[in-house]
Amino acid sequence: MSEAKLHLTRDTLLGLLHQMTRVRRFEEKCDELYQVEKIRGFLHLAIGEEAISTAVMAALTAEDAVVATYREHGHALVRGVPMRAVMAEMYGKQEGVSRGRGGSMHLFSAAHRFYGGYAIVGGGLPLAGGLALADKMQHKSCVTACFFGEGAAAEGEFHETMNLAALWKLPILFVCENNLYAMGTRLDFSESQTDIHAKAQSYRMASESVDGMDVVAVDAAASRALAAIRAGDGPQFLECKTYRFRAHSMFDPQLYRTKAEVEEWKTRDPIPRLANWMREAGMLHDRDAEKIEAEVTAEVDDAVAFAEAGAWEPVETLTRDVTAEAAP
Amino acid sequence: MSEITYREACREAIRDALKRDPRVFLMGEDVGHYGGCYAVSKGLLDEFGPERIRDTPLSESGFTGLGIGAAMNGMRPIVEIMTVNFALLALDQIVNNAATIRHMSGGQFGVPLVIRMATGAGRQLAAQHSHSLEGWFAHIPGLKILAPATLEDARGMLWTALEDPDPVLIFEHVMLYGVAGTLAADAGPVPIDKAAVRRPGKDVSLITYGGSLPKALKAAEALAAEKIEAEVIDLRTLRPLDDATIMASLAKTRRAVIVDEDWRSGSLSAEISARIMEQAFWNLDAPVARVCSAEVPIPYPRHLEEAALPQVPAIVAAAKQVVG
């Protein structure tokens, strides 16, 4: 664990542990619900990667904006989007955060400046640049946090956005969640330069690589980067090295990696890692851990009950929200 | 009234928008220091400065996406893409993001973005700068597609498009930029939801838009000399199509010729023909005819380019055939 955590209070650390646990238990429940066909379509779990979204969201303010990918349940939850509305969206119910129209991959919440989950790899980057451009042109001090996987670094939109953001000094934090596999293609099978944060430097953008399994290290790095952006230093790039413990989606037999590799990474699981460290430091007791688990279980159960009780949108409303006009 | 070119009318529309609304800015390749590939934005950089007249790198997907994000966050960007062929590099942003975000977000976010681009052939620019792909974009729910063919529309459609809460694409035909005429001194915003009858007639409807409108009007003139009164309909808006104006014209003329510089296979002209079948079949006295581009990438030599495109004699011949 990094030195930075020494400056964090017990309450802050408990909060991080609570958020990571929420995301973990929510996604485990989604996995169960998928098996019983309550959730359909694609379901991309970020189990193992929770430290990144948890830490970055903790470092943002409510005025900042967030753009995420199709693996964004945790990002929405930690950002403050109610779990009920997220779960109802997983079901496709009209009480869902996107009225059920988006599903797992397209969570949006205007109230939280959560500008969406985008399912074309790299496609969220230019849009995030535009959010940041608008903030800058309107002389607002907000930052846009843009999450993407390392697979996006192979897309032209990555290059175009990096260049534009650096050229125009846009207030944007690029957060690369490098889980080593673009679906099933290992990083060194797809990139000539596997050091992703070095790519950012080629645009003269400040960048840092951090252990994405260490929530405190990510928090510290994100806070540093955000301070630099707010000071007017332009965009910053954070590469967080992480690992996806589960399959890419629910249709993935994981032929591209060994069980041993997965097990090895599980020893770095960010949740027990933080919990164990806190225990050793005397900041986490059994009753704290039990309390977190109990609260999270209750919240997840409540979210499931809410989604179950939700309504299917009437088919008569099928064509609403295509353009601004009311549906016929 | 003042003498003005289509290009100047486009420029006046941009200038007017920049003056009306501090949220409006223009962004695209060579719109600033160069003055615009087709000189539409010439002089605007000096007048409005580099914050609002933004030269971009050659990153069509990047700056189109920036326009989408800026539009979602309180600005009213005008993105200029040099030519429709280049817009293919921004298809991901236009089709996967701009057109879907309102729906995917359950109505929480809209994209009030205007994208202008040049379209069409006639300048011997060969097969990567001459195509008419607006029909592709008109295929996509969530987009509005405009094709100003007159000075009034070049001057007036932009502001209305900027006031629209959804993404609007404006296609300016390259052969129209130099067209000169008179425009009322108080010319301003025009509606963007109706087709226009540019010349009334009772014998045949020539249905067209954009760069083909002047050709259709010339054909109508030639037909008049042969006692055939052609009605010329300028679609103006390609999505949503103004079916009512088309069908009202057909109720009168009972014959239709669709003139479109796009290819005919899987095209907007096919869509219009299908709608006529669905809505006006029993009014027809003849099969719908189409005058479209030859199914060939637009070639460079002038005589072959001209042969590939809809021309006045072909329109006249098609009209005479359906009139019988």
Image: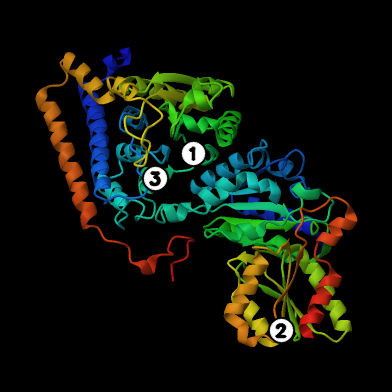
Image quadrant for the C terminus of chain B? bottom right
**Circle 1 marks a residue in which chain?**
A
Question: In the rendering, at what x and y percent does residue A310 appear?
Answer: 24, 57
Q: Position of residue A61 (x, y in %)?
A: 36, 34
- Badge 1 element: loop
Q: Label 1, label 3: how many angstroms apart (C-alpha)?
A: 12 Å
Q: Nearer the viewer, mark 2 or mark 1?
A: 2
Q: Which residue is mark 2?
A: B286
Residue drawn at point x = 16 percent, y = 17 percent: A279
**Pick the front one: B209 or B11:** B209
Q: Quadrant of residue B32?
A: top right
**Measured Cα–Cα span from mark 2 to mark 1:** 50 Å
Q: In the rendered image of this protein, does residue A111 appear above or below residue A158?
A: below
What amino acid is labelled 2 in the image?
Answer: Ala
Q: Is residue B33 above or below residue B24?
A: above
Which residue is identified by label 3? A105
- Where residue A301 appears, as percent x and y from the top left, is 17, 45
What's the chain of the residue with tag 2? B
Q: Answer yes or no: do the residues labelled 1 and 3 have beta carbons within 8 Å?
A: no
